[in-house]
Image (tube, rainbow, N blue to C red):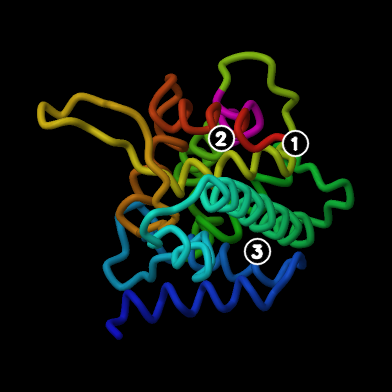
Amino acid sequence: MNNFGQNIQRTSILKELSGGNAELGEAFALILNDMVVQSGITNPKAESFDVVSKSWRNLAAKENKTQEDYDKLDKTFKDEIRDLATSYLLFMAKETGNLTGKLDYHQYEAYQLKYRFGHYDIMNKPEYISQVKVQIRNGFNKLSAHGETTGGDNLIDKHDMAAFIYALATKTKRDENNNFTGFEINGIITPENYAISENLLFMDTEDNMMSIKLRLGYNMLKE
């Protein structure tokens, strides 16, 4: 088995063992943060993360699937995203001392400064801190409103986080003329795709492909 397969297997096993606690969320956080370097460029040494379990992939690869199989794939995919989102949000909440299960901007900022932008000595660089906080605010605004331009509650809850993971776990489909034709479930978050998604989240204040994925994921996954 190559390194990519080993990484996918390791994260799948980790997910199946960790249950609904913050351990999976912590592992997910560390893997995500390792996917990009400080500037947001892809880390070539980073691992990919498989959102879905090995059993899901086995069923997805089955030939002549029944309607029951398709229903199970859909339900399992949604459940696994929700479980990961809950665990990830729980870890973020623990790290910021939050007890409500919903992060406000200041808690989200504190988390991102520590985990995403804390790899280097940034606290003694005021200009860089100011620039980073603008990026964090852009990300918070998109996540807390799950991609909508209005109507957000200025809090990130488990539904918003599930929409975020859905956005990371889906790929855009294009035809032979490079025209957008929709999204497909991939389930594997690669460093390259994560770097693109993060850039759309942090750097672009306009409605973009990440916004569309967040809206779609939110509507699809909200219970």
Please, what is the three-letter code of the amino acid marked with disc 1? Glu
x and y, in percent, of residue 33 in the image: 48, 61
x and y, in percent, of residue 207 in the image: 44, 20
- Closer mark to the observer between disc 2 and disc 3: 2
For residue 49, above or below residue 200: below
Name the residue located 58 percent from the left edge and 46 percent from the top edge.
71
Q: Which quadrant of the structure image shows residue 174?
A: top left
Count of numbered circles in the view:
3
User: Does the stretch in magenta take in 143?
Assistant: yes
**Residue 164 left/right relative to 93:** left
Q: Which quadrant does the N terminus fall into?
A: bottom left
**Residue 194 left/right relative to 90:** left
Q: Nearer the viewer, residue 95 or 213?
A: 213
Residue hosting label 2: 217
Furthest residue in direction top, as rendered: 150
Q: Check disc 1 and report its element: helix, strand or loop.
A: loop
Name the residue located 59 percent from the left edge and 77 percent from the top edge.
14
| Mark toward the start of the polypeptide (3 vs 1) | 3
User: Does the stretch in magenta take in 198?
Assistant: no
Gap between marks 2 and 3 measured at Cα:
19 Å
Residue hosting label 1: 223
**Residue 99 left/right relative to 152:** right
Q: Which residues are magenta?
A: 140-147
**Residue 9 left/right relative to 196:** right
Residue hosting label 3: 25
- Closer mark to the observer between disc 3 and disc 1: 1
Q: Residues within 10 Å of mark 2 (few under 14, many from 20)?
A: many
Please, what is the three-letter code of the amino acid marked with disc 2? Gly
